[in-house]
Image (spheres, grey):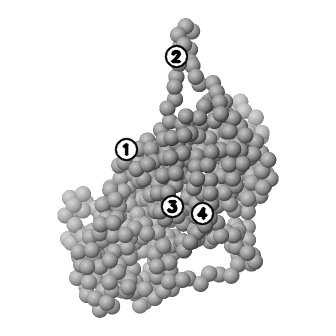
Amino acid sequence: MKPALLLIDLQSDFLQRKELVPRSDILIVQVESLLKGCRYFRVPVFHVWTKVRQDGTDRMPHWKRNNTWICVEETPGVLPPPPLHPQNDESLFTKQYFSAFGNPGLKKALGEKEIDTVIIAGVFMHGCVRSTALDAYEGGYEVWIADDAVGSNEPDHAEITRAYLDGRAAKFMDTHHILSQLGDVERPKPNASIIKVCPVANIGGKWMKANGHTRIDRRNPSRWSDIIASVPLATDAEVNEACQQATETQRVWRNVSADHRASILNTWADALVEREEELAKLLAQEIGKPIADGYDEVRRAESLIRATAGLLLNNQAHIIDNKVPVHVRYRPQGVIGLITPWNNPIAISVGKIGPALAYGNTVVWKPAVQAPQTAMAVIESLYQAGGNPGIVNLVFGEGITARRIIENPLVNAVSFTGSWEVGKSVAALCTRFGKPFQGELGGNNAAIVLRDCNIREEAHGMALSAFSFAGQRCTAIQRFIVEQPILNEFKEEFV
């Protein structure tokens, strides 16, 4: 194999497009990681830019119709951000339309280096990346697309494109997997004498050891030199097995009585409380959450489980018009795919798992890789409480793992908490497969401050609401709407 990296249209004008998924700052970091890895392995790098003359006469026809002026030569917008600038020994090709192969010099340069495999990263998935991939495939190259290093401002079209190309004209792999195919990167030596290698999954109540899986290292956020865990990334095999196990278990679990399911949930809440010191310390170690906040999160998780159990025991009948009893029977969806974030890895996860189990569903859960040992402890606490093996099946992974869960035909519904940008892609993917989707995609929360409030007391509480845990909460206050007569006083107290 003789690979080359093609970076497509990673220019400021394109990266500033609204609704880019992922956001430009995230995309730049991912591409930079891939670029550094390819340079480390001495993989040839080819930068491909769209560029038009200053008079605009060579713009694409639809740009002319829409009066679009971007990527104009000798303007800042035609250049990439500094981390992605070409090095002196790297080739740069320009193009006018979509495909990088629109410049015949690219194919000639690839031929001179005897390249047989092209790795593609850049924007936009539904346009230039797609066209480049198809032309590369037609040209006889093996095509790899860096799944976490491509972006689009049309996530629904991007998902359709990905589904069409994957397994047909291209292979989609995340950056870690691509770099592992290129060679072994020397790992930095951590201070810790022992690195915990996490299992790759928990399926049917059993931990599955990693066996040649791509791994990512998780560092102590308080002492970055310490690698505290190495997390293997699940393959299609683990995802498929987890979905199959959840399906088989759900046939039994759906027939378990509501009283028994509620009893297991309440026992699970007890088990979390018994382990709250361990869990709070894990939150501090893995995501940097203050210990006191860690205890609060465990107690919030406990209260969510107990509230769910209470609802389960009191939803058998409703009264309308004070006369007519309406009996309600809740039917499970089946297998629920859950994708949870790093900032509240216990409470948000439990807040999804509890209701899913309460109503007779089973779960395939992809937790955030930033807190793997926390996720392991959550699973262990559930089975400690007597949960049936296989009601929750955990697989570690990143974005491509989540996509495989959503696409799996055995998964009946999806719940996701994360960024708005990624949430749009998840929603588009669920739409494509006709699956119910529940998303919690952050907020832009406002506090309304009226003139009759206790300004000193409220300003203190609002500062905590805005800045506690560095604002890394979807419920953090981001805006203050203050009545004019108290504006200055409130600002002074808030500062």
Instruction: Tell me what residue is drawn at x 43 percent, y 66 percent.
Output: 147
Mark 1 belongs to which amino acid? Gly
How far apart are the two marked residues, 4 and 3, measured between alpha carbons?
9 Å
Name the side, left or right, on which 434 lies relative to 301: left
Quarter of the image for residue 107 reads bottom left
Q: Name the residue under label 2.
A: 326
Q: Dot 4 lies on which element?
A: strand
Name the side, left or right, on which 90 lies relative to 102: right
Q: Say if 149 sits above or below 332 in the image.
A: below
Q: Dot 3 lies on which element?
A: helix
Q: Nearer the viewer, residue 65 or 150?
A: 150
- Eye-nearest disc, 3 or 1: 3
Q: Earlier in the sequence, mark 4 or mark 2?
A: 4
Name the side, left or right, on which 74 lies relative to 347: left
Q: Earlier in the sequence, mark 4 or mark 3?
A: 4
How far apart are the two marked residues, 1 and 2, measured between alpha carbons?
30 Å
Q: Nearer the viewer, residue 59 or 6?
A: 6
Which label was assigned to residue 238? 3
Name the side, left or right, on which 378 lies relative to 411: right
Mark 2 belongs to which amino acid? Val
User: How packed is label 4: few (under 14 Cα within 10 Å), some, or many (20 or more)?
Assistant: some
Instruction: Tell me what residue is drawn at x 41 percent, y 90 percent.
Output: 89
Quarter of the image for residue 76 reads bottom left
Instruction: Tell me what residue is drawn at x 50 percent, y 80 percent.
Output: 37
Q: Dot 1 lies on which element?
A: loop
Q: Mark 4 points at which residue?
A: 208
Mark 3 belongs to which amino acid? Glu
